[in-house]
Image: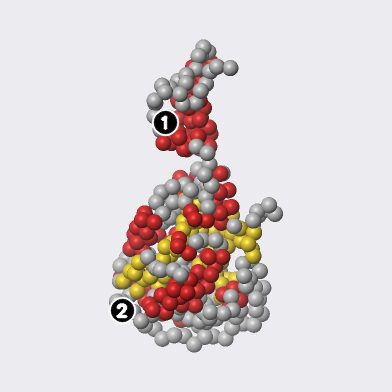
């Protein structure tokens, strides 16, 4: 049968119906339909039925629509992190790296920025030694006041330099006290048992490829605050597993700080996460178009509530307030609660880990 030949031929004996179909597709392509899977199908149909000369160029968007799907591999997944030299201990960095290496992110794809309030910080060397053990290097040392706009700028510079802009490459967005867990929803999915816990998580490569095939550009989770069994502050130790050191699940971020609990776990490098990684740029249209994958089982376990958090929040609250950053309000809410009660949790339920109400903690001195 003679007729369509992709790329080099033309069609013969074109019936009126085909001409009408071309007109219909052209009209749809000028509308918002091109942003949907239906639009991509129309683009492919257009390619198949429109007459073309042998040397006519194919537009990039049309070429992408007809190109064979190239799966994401582990080498296409990058992790973006700013780690506080002043307030976060080396043991936290160790647990953090252990977790994300376990999830399959290559060590060379860790895009790590160390932040220090001052030059020649003696706390930097122990963190560098942790990286040495894993055969890693940090990409940048940022010295100065910690402000969210600068953090976002530095993150995006690293993405531009090391990741680029392609649908095959994805970025895991996280803070230094956040460990992502993506709950499996089907027995056919590849499942990883997280060491030292009773948690299971999905394989990142498998999930990203599934997300891409159904047209998603970001995977959204929610905060799960982790505390000690009796909801008190403690230092992080290298052992045992961090899950065992902080076994209790609480909701401090929402109930006390009144903060946002949305979290962008990972996203395509074709799109950008906003400051704090709580939303994506252009969030409303992305959400309306169904391009965000959000389920209750997608979680960020939040290991913020350690001994150094009080001094950290006091300093950040002052700096943010002085520089007009609205997040000072959340820090101040928690500090007011802690100064009043000596505790980090609002309601001490007995269902999570411990039935023993915690004694009031000795409060660190105000900076």
Q: Is residue 47 visible?
A: yes
> On residue 170, which mark appears?
none
Residue that badge 1 annotates: 58
Judged left or right of residue 125, residue 232 is right
- Determine crowd level at label 1: few under 14, some 14-19, many 20+ residues with C-alpha closer than 10 A: few
Q: Please say if the residues under marks 2 and 1 sit with CB atoms less than 8 Å apart.
A: no
- Residue under the point 31% across and 79% down: 120
Judged left or right of residue 272, residue 219 is right
List the single residue furthest toward the right. Answer: 187
The quarter in which the C terminus is drawn is: bottom left
- How far from the left and from the top, in percent, is residue 172? 48, 59
Displayed quadrant of residue 365:
bottom left
- How far from the left and from the top, in percent, is residue 238? 53, 79
219 or 98, which is in the foreground? 98
Foreground mark, 2 or 1? Answer: 1
> On residue 120, which mark appears?
2
């Amino acid at each position: 049968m003679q007729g369509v030949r992709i790329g080099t031929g033309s069609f013969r004996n074109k019936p009126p119906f085909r001409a009408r179909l071309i007109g219909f597709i052209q009209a749809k392509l000028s509308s918002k339909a091109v942003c949907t899977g239906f639009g991509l199908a129309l683009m492919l149909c257009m390619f198949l039925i429109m007459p073309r000369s042998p040397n006519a160029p194919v537009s990039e968007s049309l070429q992408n629509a007809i190109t064979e799907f190239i799966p994401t591999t582990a080498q296409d997944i990058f992790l973006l992190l700013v780690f506080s030299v002043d307030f976060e201990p080396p043991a936290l960095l160790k647990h953090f790296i252990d977790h994300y290496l376990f999830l399959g992110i290559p060590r060379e794809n860790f895009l790590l920025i160390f932040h220090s309030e001052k030059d020649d910080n003696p706390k930097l060397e122990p963190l560098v030694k942790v990286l040495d053990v894993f055969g890693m290097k940090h990409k940048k040392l940022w010295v100065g006041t910690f402000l969210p706009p600068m953090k976002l700028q530095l993150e995006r510079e690293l993405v531009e330099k090391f990741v680029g802009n392609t649908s095959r490459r994805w970025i895991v967005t996280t803070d230094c006290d956040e460990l992502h867990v993506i709950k499996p929803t089907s027995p056919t999915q590849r499942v990883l048992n997280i060491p030292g816990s009773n948690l299971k998580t999905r394989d990142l490569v498998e999930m990203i490829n599934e997300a891409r095939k159904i047209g998603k550009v970001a995977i959204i989770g929610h905060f799960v605050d982790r505390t000690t069994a009796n909801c008190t502050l403690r230092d992080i130790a290298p052992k045992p597993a961090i899950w065992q050191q902080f076994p209790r699940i609480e909701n401090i971020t929402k109930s006390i700080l009144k903060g946002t609990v949305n979290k962008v776990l990972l996203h395509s490098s074709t799109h950008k996460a906003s400051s704090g990684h709580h939303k994506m740029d252009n969030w409303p249209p992305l959400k309306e178009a169904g391009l965000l994958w959000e389920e209750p089982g997608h979680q960020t376990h939040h290991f913020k509530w350690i001994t150094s958090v009080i001094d950290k929040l006091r300093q950040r609250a002052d700096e943010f307030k002085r520089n007009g950053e609205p997040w000072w309000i959340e820090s101040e809410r928690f500090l007011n609660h802690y100064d009043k009660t000596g505790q980090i949790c609002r309601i001490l339920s007995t269902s999570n880990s411990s039935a023993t109400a915690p004694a009031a903690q000795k409060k660190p001195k105000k900076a």
